[in-house]
Image: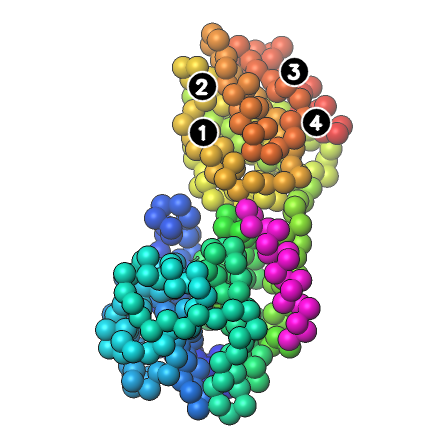
Amino acid sequence: MKIKVKGNVDWVGKIDWDLRKFHGNEYSTHRGSTYNSYLIREEKNVLVDTVWNPHAKEFVENLRREIDLDKIDFIIANHAESDHSGGLPELMSHIPETPIYCTANGVKSLKGHYHKDWNFRTVKTGDKLDLGNGKALVFVEMKMLHWPDSMASYLTGDNILFSNDAFGQHYATEYMFNDLVDQAELFAECIKYYANILTLFSSFAAKKIDEILALKLPIDIIAPSHGIIWRDKPAQIVEKYIAWAQNYQENQITILYDTMWGGTKIMAENIALGIKREDSAVNIKLFNISKTDKNDIISEIFKSRLILVGSPTIGQGITSASAGILEEIEGLKFKNKKAAAFGCYGWSGESVAKLSGLLQKSGFELINEGIKCLWNPDEDSVEKCIAFGAEIGRG
Ligand code: FEO
């Protein structure tokens, strides 16, 4: 299958409706994904990126229906992670001498993945590859967006930015263009992608976007490597990235809790009640950590100005689900967010101190020492939780 993008550029990738987990088990893909590969046919024929390994044979068979493989003059590997380079071993078995353009880090990464000495040509920001017909590809290194080897390629004449992972989303759709799909679904997947994959690299994202904008290149289309192609007002996703890269937050408080016998859940609900009593404008959301997808939780934390994390004390620590989400939080290095902890206990009650310590270590500003409750909350404890929330609500 091919989809015309513009001029002599066709999408020749794979729509993966079946995908529910990505990066092993690390990223949930409720709406599947796509691996976008693009075929440019000017005087020179160029393939930009491939697909994930399990789809390699199908990809090459489809590509063959489009073009005699020997007529592919250049391959561009914008990024070496196997969701984009996974088709290379199969493709290169047919055309082993075809040059592969990538960054110096891309060579290391592709060799590391496939242990092959393909015909690599390294490029740097500003390098140009002439395609004939007055068109060229200009390369822009995208270091740490989100890997050291990441790169974007810009097609002059058609003004298409092949941005690879940047501006992408895990979103399977047969429409393939941003103006045709459900906008709420699309932007939910965009923010989830940014929150879970790019938060850690926000300072690089902000600088790189400034650098690209300073080039004053006309951009008619942004063609990422996952999800839809931005042909309608492509600047809108760039503007979102600019906002998201600047320690983004909305007026949201997220209350995350785990619970063994329901006590910490009662605490969560009454803290929420207290906040709401004092601040009716704030968007308060509650999630049971054990029952909620971890990547969806990360998206909600990303949108929050404050998070409250609750766990009962189990043994001398916190529940495994709480520990898991805190490990995710620590790795992403959120900035400009506040936090506090809460939890029930039956004897020694270490959970609140432990949660507070982990939140602080992850860069959250603790607003207080937290609140803990012996046994299931009685009337007095419920009132204390409401008061705890009310204080937060008053700011
Ligand atoms: Fe879509 Fe970093 O791979």
The residue pinned by badge 1 equals 323
Amino acid bearing label 4? Ile
Quadrant of the rendered image containing residue 333: top right
SS label for mark 4? helix
SS label for mark 2? loop
Question: Which label number is shown at residue 392?
Answer: 4
SS label for mark 1? helix
Q: In terms of depth relative to the viewer, which is nearer, 144 or 39?
A: 144
The residue pinned by badge 2 equals 317
Residue shown at 47%/55% (left/top)?
A: 147
Badge nearest the viewer, 2 or 4: 2
Contact (Cβ within 8 Å) of mark 1 with mark 2: yes
Q: Disc 1 versus disc 4: distance between alpha carbons? A: 24 Å
Amino acid bearing label 2? Gly
Badge nearest the viewer, 3 or 2: 2
The residue pinned by badge 3 equals 383
**Which span of residues is magenta-colored?**
199-217
Based on the picture, tell me whether residue 204 belongs to the magenta stretch.
yes
Q: Disc 3 versus disc 1: distance between alpha carbons? A: 28 Å
Q: Disc 2 versus disc 4: distance between alpha carbons? A: 25 Å
Q: Disc 3 versus disc 2: distance between alpha carbons? A: 26 Å
Residue shown at 42%/52% (left/top)?
A: 30
Image coords of residue 369 (percent x, y) = 63, 19
